[in-house]
């Protein structure tokens, strides 16, 4: 099965580069504190790795388009289907606060910014969240937490977008 990636993500997926190390000081939560032991090594997908087409299309997923949503990583993408406004956001935003062990265990639903300890560019992350909010998705599947839809999604994304600095960004950044 081919794995399609943004050109800026390819060095991490062909084994040429490791992701930046985790920042345990990004938040006071226990998961953030434990993050230096989380793997950040690049992997080599070999012949399965493919570069995404520059026109936003996704081979083998005709109704979907990819959107460059950097912040969590430089080559992060989200997938969007215009027909029903379904969004696969990855870690552009998440639906459970990743820094809190309690919230991760309980899977407490809460639209949040990307995981603080592994996010590389906060200004880009803010722009990406605002762009995704502007799409007015009807449903979002994120990298962490349960899918979210309807009013819960609209209100959560609006609040995150309007208060990104306070709700998502590490205090020291």
Image: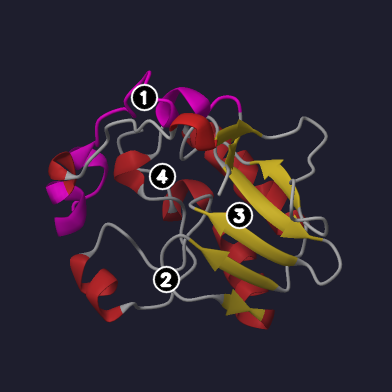
Mark with earlier residue (3, 4): 3
Tell me how far mark 1 sits from mark 3, CA to CA: 34 Å
- First in sequence, mark 2 or 1: give its number: 1
- Out of 72 and 166, give the one closest to the viewer: 72
Q: Residues within 10 Å of mark 4 (few under 14, many from 20)?
A: many
Q: Viewer-proximal residue, 67 or 49?
A: 49
Q: Identify the image's colour scheme: rainbow, by chain, secondary structure or one colour.
A: secondary structure
On the image, numbered disc 4 is attached to which residue?
169
Q: x and y percent of residue 146 in the render?
A: 46, 76
The x and y percentages for residue 15 are 36, 24
Q: Secondary structure at mark 3?
A: helix
For residue 155, which numbered disc appears in the image? Answer: none
Q: Total of numbered circles in the picture?
A: 4
**Magenta region: which residues?**
7-34
Which one is earlier in the sequence, the residue at label 1 or at label 3?
Answer: 1
The residues tagged by marks 3 and 2 sit, at their Cα atoms, a distance apart of 18 Å
Residue 62 locus on image (x, y percent):
82, 55
Q: Is residue 48 above or below residue 32?
A: above
Q: Which residue was labeled with disc 1?
A: 15
């Amino acid at each position: 099965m081919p794995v399609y990636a943004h050109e800026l993500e390819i060095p991490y997926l062909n084994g040429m580069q490791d992701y930046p190390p985790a920042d345990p000081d990004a938040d006071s939560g226990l998961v953030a504190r434990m993050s230096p032991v989380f793997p950040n090594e690049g992997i080599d997908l070999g012949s399965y790795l493919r570069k995404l087409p520059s026109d936003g299309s996704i081979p083998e997923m005709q109704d979907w388009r990819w959107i460059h949503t950097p912040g969590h990583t430089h080559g992060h993408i989200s997938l969007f289907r215009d027909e029903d406004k379904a969004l696969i956001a990855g870690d552009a935003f998440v639906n459970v606060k990743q820094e809190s062990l309690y919230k991760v265990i309980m899977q407490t639903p809460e639209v949040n910014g990307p995981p603080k300890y592994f996010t590389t560019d906060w200004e880009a992350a803010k722009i990406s969240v605002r762009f995704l909010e502007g799409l007015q998705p009807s449903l979002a599947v994120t990298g962490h937490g349960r899918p979210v839809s309807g009013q819960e999604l609209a209100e959560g994304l609006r609040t995150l977008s309007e208060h990104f600095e306070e709700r998502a960004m590490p205090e020291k950044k």
